[in-house]
Each structure stands twice: as structure tokens, then as C-alpha cells.
Amino acid sequence: MDMVTLTIDGQRVSVPRGTSVLEAARASGIDIPTLCYLKDINVVGVCRVCVVEIEGAKSLQASCVTPAAEGMVVRTNTPAVREARRTVLELILSNHPFECLTCERNGNCELQALAERLGIREIEYEGERACFAKDTSSHAIVRNPEKCILCRRCMSVCSRVQSVFAIAPNDRGFETMIAPAFGDSLADVACVQCGQCTLVCPTGALTEKDSIAEVYAALADPKKHVVVQTAPAVRATIGEEVGLPPGTLVTGNLVAALRRLGFDRVFDTDFAADLTIMEEGHEFLERLKHGGKLPLITSCSPGWIKFIEHFYPDLLDNLSTCKSPQQMFGALAKTYYAQKAGIDPKDIFVVSVMPCTAKKFEAKRPEMTASGYPDVDAVLTSRELGRMLREAGLNLAELPPEQYDDPLGISTGAGVIFGATGGVMEAALRTVYEVVMDRELENVDFEEVRGLSGIKEAAVNLDGMRVKVAVAHGLGNARKLLDKVRDGSADYHFIEIMCCPGGCIGGGGQPIPTDDEIRAKRIDAIYREDRGMPLRKSHLNPAVKALYDEFLEKPLSHRAHELLHTSYVARGRFPARVSS
């Protein structure tokens, strides 16, 4: 490997050629502060917080965009560097609302933390402040441009990772704002509401739309029977909201906490994930045997669904008609469960705890009313539930674990792994193999579809047919696969696509920060949970078997289609405009 050696604060450091000064310093144990920098995603040097002195340079240099060079001498903590960083930060703060105590990001704000780190106690620069309206049009995301520091991290994630390009710089100078073009709102453009922008925003400029008050109101209503479902990924991430290390499993502790918050029943979305496998797996087999539209593409991720509706509407027939597990659960809570419990569906209030902001949008889709009522009434992200737990003083680590309620709380390891990229595909293969081959699958671990590679491929022999599958996570990778499907060069039979990098464990509603190291720890936790489950295949779930025997009859039955399947909408890429 071609290496260069430089001196940073008197220490000789050797790094691969092409490494930035910033990363070279970090490799040597020196943490240069940043605001706009996101490794490999947003390397633009616009905030100037990371400036350093480089011997021979005429001015201070932004370390994030300056390559380390042989013999370079760098100083990261001189009086000039400290003064420059403080000045830059004071200028940013001079145009920032001082709402820290009431801001959603209070205590977890990079701007706030940096001001503390640099010892900012007074702002010498007083003047006019930018005044922008808040955008609350979206079901999922709130955009508050007055808190934006123009770092462009959200824009880079939206364009470079998700390939959506929903937001960009508008206007110039003091009027610059990161927003949809032409002053449009997020609800009016091809924003998929995935929330990846909220994960990388260093301030409170982009947040999830808060549903906590709505949930508290339902819990306080004696006429409401309030049930809650928890998504597979939440058990591996919610601990971070109360200070536990990434990858800490708190499944039973979470159940206990939700009961203490006042929910009448605590159920598991994993039950509906097992059900999804039964419906989607049989749908795949139907298409495979009878010449249906292939490849079949999974439909569990609502951000991904909105993406294909906007950008690839010609491929909607390739989508599985299955609802997501969240919506399947809601439909059953207000039919099957209501019937068994003897409760009028109008009195059942379904709350979802999800890793995903797009789930808020999905719950509001008009077609998601299988029972005559909304399948799901309110969606909380992991972050929102974290705020509720902290407000209630519930320490997950100290709560004795409890079990989910029957009948919608029984699940298998296959349902658990929905939380990781490749998990839906692996769960489907576990069941489809045994249904087709009529024999037990000895090794249930499909390692080929696991991990954080952007696109993964595998093949499985089903009764003499070599079935090719692919897995993509992150919409930029999805676009690569869909372009192949569109031009006919893809020969896959089955494709899993998850909107967010890493799958649901990296969802837009998950704890902040989220990066690949954290994603890997969360994924490991998901598979640990799977390995510890007594049942690891969806078709062996006794509660799902009982559901079919008592209510649905069989996979893909008429009632199953009415409750568990849906249709999609071809959406335009651009807002409709009336010409003057």
C-alpha cells in the first residue's frame, strides 16, 4: 500500500495516500471538530470548523478536504486555529434560534456539543437573523430551516445514498435554505419520507413528526383499548435511547416498560412478519409456478414503496401485493383480535413502535383501512419512545423482562431477522424451501444475504430449479437493481429491497448517531436473538397456524387478500403545476 508520512502536532503519522488530514489526525488520536463532515458521504469543507495550520500554506486549511502529503507538518491546536474555530462557531450561532431547552435534539445536538467543547459563552456578533417558515406538511418529517446550519449533510444523504434528490440549496447568501426546489413542501415532492436526513442532521432542523401527545391522549381515554406492537429492529436499538451500548437486546425489558406506560396489550410485529412470510412466500411460489410477473420484489419497506411509486411506476406489477407487517398487524388487531377479545374495532387504538419515519406515512395511506378503520392509528419512532421512557423514568436495564401477550405476540426467529438487511429474504427462503421440498432445511442460516454489502446475491435449488435472489439496502443500491430489471438484464426471481442502509436497524427513526459500526452491532444483536429462539421458521409459528385455521383459512385466501394485501399508486416525480 502506498503510504505517506506527515507530522501532526509533533507526532509522525503514516497513512495511506489519499487519506485526509482529518482522518490522519483521528488515526493518531486527535479529534478535530467537524459539523458538515460525513465520511464518504459529505466531504465538502463548508463549515470551516475543522481548520488546521499547515506549514507553508498561506491560510488555514479545512482538514476534511485536504489530502495528507509526504512531509506535511500540521498543527491542530494553535491560537490561530482556536480563534478561527470559535469565530466560525459564533457566526453560526448568531443566526441560530436559542431554543435548546425546548428543542427535540436538546442533549443530542452536535452544534450544542461543539459550543460546549469550544467554551462558547457569549456571542459577539449580533444582527439580523434568517426567518423561514416551518414545513409540517409531511406525515413523517418536520423541516425547521431556522435551525439549519447549511452543512448539506441531509442533501448529500438524500442524493448520494438514497438517490432521491428531494432537497437542495435554494436562493443565495443570507437567504440560502436547504429545501425542495421552488419553495415546495416535502409533501408535494418525491420525498420518500425515509428519514435518513433526520439521522444525519447535526441540529433540530430535520426531525420526525411527533406523535407522543396523540398516544398519551389515547392511553388516558377510558373508552380506548390501546394495543402496541414493536418492530423487530426496535429490540436491538431502543436501549441506546436510555444509555445502553449499541447492540444491547432488551426485548423482555421493553415489553415490561410498555406495560408500565399503560398499554392494554403489548404485541410483537414479529408475529405479523411471520405472517408476511406465509403470504409473500406463497405469492412467490404462485408466480413461479404459473408464469406470474418476476422478479417478485418485497413490499415491507414503506420508504422503498414510495420510491418505486415515484421513480419506477412501470415496475409496480413486480411488487408483492402483501402489506407490510405493521399494516397486517393493524388489520388483524381490528378484526381477528377484536373478535377474539370481544371488543368493538372502533374502540381499539393501535400504536406501532417502529424504526422508521416512513411508517408514519404508510399508516396514513387511504388504502390501509381493511377493517373499515385505519389499520394503525399512531406510529412512534424509536426516538419518540425513548423520550417517553425517559419522561416516565423507566430504566430498561433494571426492569424485569416480561413476555408479549397472546395471540399476536408469538413469533419465530424468522420474524426477528426482518430487522436486518437480507432478513426478509432469508426468512422467506427458510419457509419456501420447506414448502417446496417437503423436507426440513438443515441449515437455516443463509449467510450469502447477510452483511452490509450494498447488493448481495444468492441462489437456492428449489425442486431442481435454480432460483436466483438479490438483496439491496439503501435506495441508491435499489436503483441499480431496478435499472437492470427495467432493461431486462436482471435474471433474478426474487428481490428484497430495504429503503434504509442496513435495513430497519438503520431506519430513519432510530437513535442518533447511526453509522456503519453501530449498524453492524445492531445486526449482530438481531441474529443473536434469532439463534436463541425455539422456532426459527415462520410456517412453524403456532399462532400463525391458528390464525389460518380459525380465521384466514389458508395463505392467499379471499379473506387474506382483503385484509393483508394492498395495491399501489403511480406517482409523478415532480409536483403538478398550474401554468399562468
Image (tube, rainbow, N blue to C red):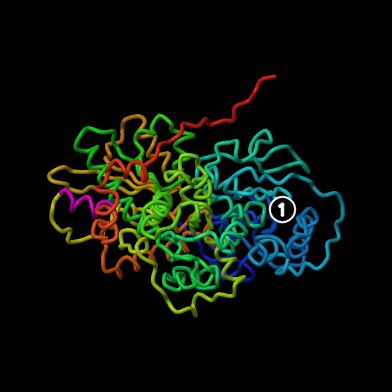
**Which one is in front, 18 or 549?**
549
* In the rendered image, the vertical position of residue 529 relative to residue 46, given as above or below: below
Q: What residue span does the magenta drawing correspond to? A: 427-436
Q: Is residue 434 magenta?
A: yes
Q: Residue furthest top?
A: 580
Residue position marked by numbered label 1 in the rendering? 147
67 left or right, relative to 462? right
489 left or right, relative to 104? left
* In the rendered image, the vertical position of residue 295 relative to residue 416, given as above or below: above
Q: Residues within 10 Å of mark 1 (few under 14, many from 20)?
A: many
Question: Is residue 440 visible from the viewing direction of this image?
Answer: yes
Q: Is residue 342 magenta?
A: no
**Which one is in front, 283 or 19?**
283
Task: Please state the horizontal and vertical placement of residue 160, each as a whole percent of the image.
Answer: 52, 44
Q: Give the SS element for disc 1.
A: helix
Task: Please state the horizontal and vertical placement of residue 5, each as a whole percent of the image.
Answer: 54, 63
Quadrant the C terminus occupies = top right
* In the rendered image, the vertical position of residue 343 relative to residue 532, given as above or below: above
Residue shown at 36% from the left, 41% from the top: 562
Residue shown at 26% from the left, 52% from the top: 548
Quadrant the N terminus occupies = bottom left
Given the image, on which type of amino acid does mark 1 rest? Lys
Which quadrant would residue 252 be assigned to in this image? bottom left
